[in-house]
Amino acid sequence: ALRVRDKSNQNYKVESGEKVYLRAQGWLADYLDHAKYNEIPLAFHFWIGAAVLGAACRRNYSIPISVRGTQLNQYTILTGDKGTGKGEAMKIGLRVLERMNRQIRTKCEEGEFGKSEGIVVPVYPQDITQESLVSSLSDLSQRKNLTKYPNGKSGMQLGEACALIAADEFANFAGNEVYNAQKRITFLLTAGFEDNYYKATKGGGEERIDRMCLSLISTTQPGWMRNTITSDAMEGGFVERVNFIHREETNRSYSTFRVPIIDPLRSEALASR
């Protein structure tokens, strides 16, 4: 993880096994500097920042480590007992992403990106139903967007099913019944790591999603997870595809200087980048 040193303000507490990069630069380093004035563990901020950055990249970037390349979208779940700052860390990251979407919509209205909102990253809440989730992603992939390119030319671009699920509690998102939870997890396995999704419905129709890039950020307590993720889900590969970030407790130290609030102007600057 990254750490920003500043003698006049509270530093991050580095846990055992975390590396410190004192000269880190770039968007993620600036995000950590923006989010550091609290007791939330460094690892929570780092992985939420990485997940938000991956969601914002949509399908525009990939890492060449597989046949088709690996997209930057991630499934990240923060785990820990109550009071460890899981939810607050998630809110800070979501605030930046929401500001990015607002800036994109403004530029679309001004004609700078064309007259389409196809490049925003929709954020779905935890209470969205499976049917609504699939329907919304399908609509995104079937939509054609009028896009203005950097060279000044415009053209039609195929829609992409790029979105982020923000679930305050993963157990609530997955559902209490084993069948529903397994259904959710099976879909997440496909949506997060495959390009396309297809399923025939009982009425003779079909559910089809093309060009998918789904991200997930969530929180939970260890006890809740034991009742949500079954042994089938573990053997099916879901656990290996999720970043589980666990911390036992927070720093519990306070700066002698007045701790500033999260600066909304810095959130806007991070969103614009």
Image (cartoon, rainbow, N blue to C red):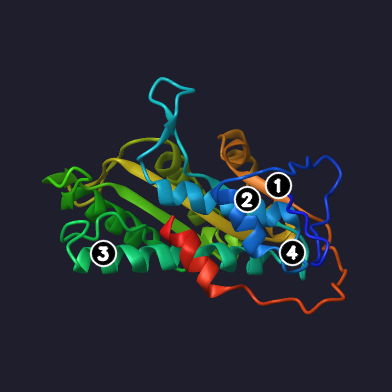
Q: Residue at x 23, y 45 (%)?
A: 150
Mark with earlier residue (2, 3): 2
Judged left or right of residue 228, residue 150 is left
Real-space CA distance between mark 1 and mark 3, rounded to the nearest whole angstrom = 32 Å
Q: Which mark is residue 246?
A: none
User: Mark 1 is on which residue type?
Assistant: Leu
Q: Which residue is mark 2?
A: 29
Mark with earlier residue (4, 3): 4
Real-space CA distance between mark 4 and mark 1, rounded to the nearest whole angstrom = 14 Å
Real-space CA distance between mark 2 and mark 4, rounded to the nearest whole angstrom = 16 Å
| Residue 174 locus on image (x, y percent) | 53, 58
Quadrant location of the C terminus?
bottom left
| Quarter of the figure with residue 101 | bottom left
| Residue 81 locus on image (x, y percent) | 78, 64
User: Mark 4 is on which residue type?
Assistant: Ile
Q: Which residue is mark 1?
A: 2
Judged left or right of residue 101, residue 266 is right
Q: Residues within 10 Å of mark 3 (few under 14, many from 20)?
A: some
Q: Nearer the viewer, mark 4 or mark 3?
A: 3
User: Mark 3 is on which residue type?
Assistant: Lys
Mark with earlier residue (1, 2): 1
Mark with earlier residue (4, 1): 1
Q: Dot 4 lies on which element? A: loop
Q: Dot 2 lies on which element? A: helix
Q: Which mark is residue 40?
A: 4
| Residue 173 locus on image (x, y percent) | 52, 62
Q: Nearer the viewer, mark 2 or mark 4?
A: 2
Real-space CA distance between mark 1 and mark 2, rounded to the nearest whole angstrom = 7 Å
Q: Residue at x 59, y 39 (%)?
A: 232
| Quarter of the figure with residue 5 | bottom right
Vertical comparison of 144 with 252: above or below: above
For the residues labelled 1 and 2, say whether their Cβ atoms are less than 8 Å apart. yes
